[in-house]
Each structure stands twice: as structure tokens, then as C-alpha cells.
Image (tube, rainbow, N blue to C red):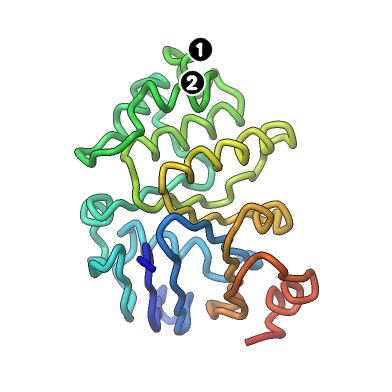
């Protein structure tokens, strides 16, 4: 089985504060991993490291068998990592279409602008609009489209449903199946634990920078996750 992501003994710090303490996990190519945990558990730090946005870490990370460079966003992108960040972080001075174009890289793959517009038809309808003219749900679709434009091997979502209406959340989650069908590995952070676990193959729970649960999502119980969420399992 080919591993999209392998992490061993990952430690990360902000000064004296240890954000991650010996994190180890693996995610097979094409699978979906739900990453859950309370605020401050280390989830966003983990995603930042993968995207090359943080260099103060120790341990081993391999993407598709290739070692991840520390603090190098360009090399992370070349390895096939792309992030849909919390809060969308679209370029406000650019149109929807320009935001998509700026996400493109030289990686080959199925996600050209036409394919992204088929996935989210509203993107085509509002292609000349600025992000400020869009709803929060439309902005999230553009943020996902911008990340897809890089034709990633691994697509990371930081708080995928934060601030979105239930109808938009359902639409975004329904699009994940089409993305995964193209062989993309998904790592999804969401506070809606039940929803994200329903679409995931594996679930990993962080507590105070440590992995307190890592296993198949199918069959995981509310008690399992409750204990892990609050540090009751190892």
C-alpha cells in the first residue's frame, strides 16, 4: 500500500511552548483522514508544518516517500501539498477567476479551471466577482478551487465547515467525493466530528499535541472519540 503521508516522532514548538509532542501517523494514498481535537490541540500547527509555513520542528515527514523540507512552502507545493486555510484567505483585490489562476502550478492533473467550475458551478457564474461580493459559502468553494488548481497529491482542509450554513456544508462535503475519486488524499479538520468521520477512512485525534486516537473511522464510537478528545486514551 502506497503511503501519501508518513509522520514519525514529530515535535514542534513556538518558543518554550510545545505544540506537537511526538506525533506519528500514516495516511494511504487516496484515503481521507479526519483530524479532530479541541482548540489548541495542535491541528493547525500540523497543517502549517506540512505546507512549509513553519520550520521549528523535529522528526520525520515523508510525502509520497519523499522527505518534506522544513519551512519551504514552494517545496511543499512541488511535493503535491495544498491547503484550504481557515478563513479562506482569498486575495481580495483579485476576481474569482484570478484567485483560481494564482493557485495553478506546473503539476499535471485533472483539475483545470473548467473542471473546477464544473465541480462548483457558482464559481463560473461569479468568475468576475471579487471575494467581498460573495457569500461565505461561495468564498469557501473558491478557496477549495484555488487549492485544487495546484493538482495536489494531498489536499488539507483547516476547519472546512466553520461559519457555513448547513446547506452549504452539505454541498461542500458532497464535492469531496468527486475530489477523492480523482485519487486525491484528503486531510480534513472540522469541529463537526460526526460529519467528518462519516466521510473518512481514518480518524486521528490530537490532545495537547499528542495523538490520543488513530484508527479506522468505521466503527469508531462516540465514547472512543470523547475519551481521545479529552486525553483519556493513548
Q: Is residue 222 left or right of residue 59?
A: right
Residue 157 rendering spot, x and y as whole percentages: 50, 50
Look at 68% across and 77% down and name the residue there. 228
Res. 97 image quadrant: top left
Q: Which mark is residue 123?
A: 2
Quarter in which the C terminus is drawn: bottom right
The residue positioned farthest toward the front in the image shown: 1
Q: Tags 1 and 2 in contact by the CB under 8 Å rule?
A: yes
Look at 41% across and 48% down and name the residue there. 183
Near-viewer residue (17 or 141): 141
Residue, disc 1: 125
Q: Is residue 176 above or below residue 41?
A: above
Residue 68 rendering spot, x and y as whole percentages: 26, 66
Q: Is residue 6 above or below residue 198?
A: below
Near-viewer residue (166 or 129): 166
Circle 1 sits in a helix, a strand or a loop, which is it? helix
Amino acid at each position: 500500500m502506497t503511503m501519501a503521508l508518513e509522520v514519525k516522532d514529530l515535535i514542534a514548538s513556538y518558543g518554550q511552548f510545545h505544540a506537537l509532542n511526538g506525533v506519528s501517523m500514516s495516511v494511504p494514498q487516496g484515503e481521507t483522514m479526519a483530524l479532530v481535537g479541541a482548540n489548541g490541540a495542535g491541528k493547525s500547527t500540523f497543517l502549517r508544518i506540512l505546507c512549509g509555513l513553519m520550520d521549528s520542528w523535529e522528526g520525520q515527514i515523508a510525502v509520497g516517500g519523499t522527505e518534506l523540507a522544513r519551512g519551504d512552502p514552494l517545496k511543499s507545493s512541488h511535493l503535491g501539498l495544498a491547503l484550504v486555510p481557515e478563513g479562506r484567505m482569498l486575495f481580495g483585490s483579485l476576481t474569482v477567476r484570478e484567485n483560481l489562476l494564482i493557485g495553478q502550478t506546473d503539476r499535471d492533473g485533472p483539475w483545470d479551471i473548467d473542471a473546477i467550475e464544473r465541480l462548483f458551478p457558482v464559481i463560473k457564474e461569479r468568475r468576475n466577482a471579487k471575494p467581498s461580493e460573495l457569500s461565505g459559502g461561495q468564498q469557501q468553494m473558491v478557496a477549495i478551487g484555488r487549492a485544487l488548481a495546484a493538482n495536489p497529491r494531498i489536499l488539507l482542509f483547516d476547519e472546512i465547515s466553520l461559519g457555513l450554513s448547513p446547506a452549504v456544508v452539505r454541498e461542500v462535503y458532497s464535492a469531496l467525493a468527486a475530489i477523492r475519486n480523482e485519487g486525491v488524499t484528503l486531510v480534513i479538520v472540522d469541529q463537526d466530528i460526526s460529519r467528518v468521520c462519516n466521510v473518512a477512512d481514518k480518524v486521528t485525534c490530537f490532545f495537547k499535541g499528542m495523538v490520543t486516537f488513530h484508527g479506522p473511522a468505521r466503527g469508531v464510537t462516540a465514547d472512543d472519540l470523547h475519551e481521545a478528545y479529552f486525553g483519556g486514551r493513548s
